[in-house]
Image (spheres, grey):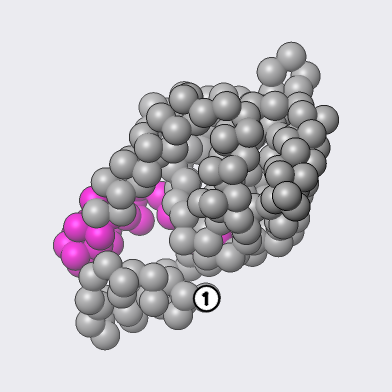
Amino acid sequence: MKNLLINYISEHIELNEDEKNAIDLLNIFHSFKKGEILLKEGQISNKGYFVLKGCVRSYYIIDGEEKTTNFYTETEGITPHCVINNKPSEYYLNCVEDTIILISNADMEAEMFEKFPKFESLCRILSEKLLTKKQIDLDKFKISSPEQRYKNLLKNRPDLIQRIPQHQLASFLGIKPQSLSRIKARILKNDER
């Protein structure tokens, strides 16, 4: 797992042997089984997550119904709101698949940033990229029809179609599973023409 992380970091910054060894010494790699919950509504947490392998879903429960807001897959980070505002979480994080996650907290990060300032630069670069991506995704979601949302998902995150149960995909797209089935059938029919 260490090599997956080092390879990912090396795509953004160059690491020397001391920095690679520092990563190796951290006890940050954790395995979770499919269905395990990382964060519950009402829980306060100081943990940030980075998915090395697998998939994590964020969702709210509103009037007894799960509303999926995101899926985090390989090389995606998750900083729950409760880490920033120190208030109870309003949503859940759970593993959709068997998942390997890097878990950190503010103290661990501060120590690494002090020893290796390069890591702070990396976090800033990744945060800026993530913020831009999230804004674009939100804008596209707001201006798209349900069918366009599904087509965007097919184009930009096709792996999710195979990895995620249909009812969770439908929730993520803001529609009912029956509507997703109709959209899929319509797209398939149009592709056959």
Q: Would you say 65 lies left or right of 108 here?
A: right
Q: Is residue 100 visible?
A: yes
- Magenta part of the chain: 101-124
The residue shown at (63%, 33%) is 147
The residue shown at (76%, 22%) is 65
Q: Is residue 102 magenta?
A: yes
Q: Residues within 10 Å of mark 1 (few under 14, many from 20)?
A: some
Residue 97, horizontal then vertical, whole percent: 71, 57
The secondary element bearing badge 1 is classed as loop
Residue 42, horizontal then vertical, whole percent: 60, 25
The residue beneath circle 1 is 1
Residue 39, horizontal then vertical, whole percent: 61, 39
Front residue of this view, candidates 137 and 107: 137
The residue shown at (54%, 52%) is 155
Q: Is residue 21 above or below residue 100?
A: below
Q: Is residue 151 above or below residue 19?
A: above
Front residue of this view, candidates 104 and 143: 143
Residue most extreme to the front: 193
Q: Would you say 160 lies left or right of 34 here?
A: left
Instruction: Name the main secondary structure of what is drawn in magenta.
Output: helix
Front residue of this view, candidates 117 and 139: 139
Front residue of this view, candidates 4 and 175: 175
Residue most extreme to the bottom: 17
The residue shown at (37%, 37%) is 136
Disc 1 residue type (three-letter): Met
Q: Is residue 119 magenta?
A: yes
Residue 41, horizontal then vertical, whole percent: 63, 28
